[in-house]
Each structure stands twice: as C-alpha cells, then as structure tokens.
C-alpha cells in the first residue's frame, strides 16, 4: 500500500472529525458561516508571519489556512455540493485561462499587459456567469473584505470609467474637505451616526490617497500599529528602569518617554 500524502492524511482527519457519533462534537457543530471568521483569522496570521519574515511560522500558518480550505470543502462534500478535487480543478482551469501567454499560443507580455489581459479575461468570465445580463461595475467586490482594501478596489473599478482624480493634490483637497466636515460635526455635537458617516468619508479618502501613492493602506496601517507597539514597549521598559508605574505618571512624563523611544528608530 502506498504511503498517504500529507493532503490525503488531512482529508482523512477531517472526515473522521466530521463523522457523526464518533467525530469531534465541536467540528460536527460547525458550518460555513461559523468557521468563516477562522478562515479570515488564519489568512491574517499568514500575512503576519510573512511580514515578520518567520518562515517556520509561515509553514505552520499556511497549514492552518489549508485546514480551513479542506474543512469548507469537506462540509460542501457532505452537502453534495462539491469536494476538494472540484475546488482544485476549478482554480487550475482558471489559472490556465488567465495565463494564455504561458499556457496558450500568446507571446510573452509585459507585467502591465498581463494585468490588462487578466482583467479582460475576468470580465468575460463574469459575463458568461451572468448570462450577459448587465451588472454593476462594483457588483462582485466582496463586502466582507477589510474596509480599506474594499475601498481601494471600489476606487480602482470606478477609475476604469474615468471617475478618479488625475492629480494627487485633488485627493489632498478632498481630504481637507472631509476633515472639515468631520470637525464641524464634532463642534456641533453631532450624533454618533453622523460622526460615523463623516469618519467613513475621511477613511475612504485616506484609502484613495494611499492608492494614488501606490501604497497598500492595510499594510501601512499594520506598519503603523507595529511602530506604536515597539515604541510603547520601550516606554514600558523605561518606566520599569526608573521604578515608576506608567499608570501614575503624568502625560508630560509619558510624552517624554515616547519622544525618547522615537529617537531609537523603533
């Protein structure tokens, strides 16, 4: 008997976990919606390992993410919808279709040509799926995407028909406008709904600014969070070294420690 591959073992493990009466009560209770959050979390943990350049952790996190794919496929198979083979086959066919410059007779192209070709092929696939019925340009952008990521995708789609600022200075002008409106709501003691609405406008423009700068706003946000974490950790060390409790220090004392942490390029 040939030795089982890693993916075969994983399939067998999921099958056992999902077997009624003898399986795991927690795994048996799950459905597509209940484990969706774990799928998202595992994807973020993959990104975290990559940004920390921790390849050992990346191997583990990719395994956790693969488990989510197999878990979803297993539940679909139980429901008679599709199985893991169908998932792998579908993505394989999609990659073949979208890379005609590699797998068909098209000649080599530049990266920009490849991107444009990808979008054209994707649009044809979408048209075939909808039966040629006109759809919104924004139709298939998932609402569950992280907010800033979805903002950028919406803006890129709108830019295809020319709805975009040609100059970055215009984005800054819009940001100033939205910040002014938010400030006005604050000064007028606006409701939480109005503040949420205006804050959303500010965030949308910030995402647009990042897009014009060719910066991923989610990556920039993670970098900013990590910078804050590093500097705050240094503040804690400073406080410990001085024998003081941060909770009892004045804001001026805390700011002094913060400025000290900044000089260390943290």
Image: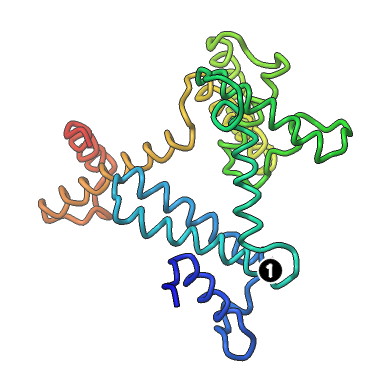
Q: Quadrant of residue 102?
A: top right
Q: Position of residue 28 (x, y in %)?
A: 62, 79
From the viewer's perspective, tell me whether residue 18 is left or right of residue 217: right
Residue 119 image point, x, y percent:
66, 27
x%, y% of residue 155? 64, 26
Placement of the N terminus among the 4 image quadrants: bottom left
The residue nearer to you, when weighing 231 against 7, is 7
Q: Quadrant of residue 85?
A: bottom right
State the residue lying farthest toward the bottom. 21
Residue under label 1: 77
The location of residue 140, given as percent across then percent down, is 73, 39
The residue lying toward the viewer, choosing from 182 and 107, is: 107
Q: Is residue 206 above or below residue 36?
A: above
Q: Residues within 10 Å of mark 1 (few under 14, many from 20)?
A: some
Q: Residue at x 58, y 67 (%)?
A: 71
* Figure quadrant of residue 60: bottom left
How many marks can you see?
1
Q: Is residue 128 left or right of residue 205?
A: right
Q: Residue at x 60, y 79 (%)?
A: 18
**SS at circle 1:** helix
Which of the image's four quarters has the C terminus? top left
Q: Is residue 21 left or right of residue 130?
A: left
Q: Is residue 37 above or below residue 161?
A: below
Residue at the (56%, 8%) spot, across then down: 167
Q: How is the image coloured?
A: rainbow
């Amino acid at each position: 008997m040939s030795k089982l591959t890693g993916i075969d073992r994983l399939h067998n493990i999921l099958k056992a976990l999902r077997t009624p009466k003898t399986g795991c009560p927690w795994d048996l209770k799950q459905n597509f919606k209940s484990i969706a959050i774990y799928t998202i979390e595992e994807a973020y943990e993959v990104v975290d390992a990559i940004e920390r350049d921790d390849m050992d952790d990346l191997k583990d996190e990719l395994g956790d993410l693969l488990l989510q794919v197999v878990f979803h496929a297993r539940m679909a198979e139980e429901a008679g919808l599709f199985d893991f083979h169908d998932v792998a086959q579908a993505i394989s066919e999609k990659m073949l279709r979208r890379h005609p410059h590699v797998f068909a007779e098209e000649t080599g192209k530049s990266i920009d040509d490849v991107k444009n070709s990808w979008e054209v092929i994707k649009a044809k696939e979408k048209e075939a799926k909808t039966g040629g019925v006109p759809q919104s340009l924004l139709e298939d952008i998932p609402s569950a995407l992280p907010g800033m990521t979805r903002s950028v995708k919406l803006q890129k789609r709108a830019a295809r028909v020319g709805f975009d600022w040609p100059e970055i200075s215009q984005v800054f002008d819009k940001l100033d406008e939205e910040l002014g409106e938010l400030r006005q709501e604050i000064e007028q003691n606006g409701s939480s709904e109005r503040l949420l609405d205006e804050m959303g406008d500010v965030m949308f423009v910030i995402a647009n600014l990042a897009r014009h700068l060719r910066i991923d706003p989610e990556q920039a946000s993670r970098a900013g969070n990590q910078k804050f974490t590093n500097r705050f950790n240094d503040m804690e060390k400073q406080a410990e070294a001085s024998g003081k409790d941060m909770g009892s220090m004045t804001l001026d004392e805390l700011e002094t420690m913060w400025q000290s942490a900044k000089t260390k390029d943290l």
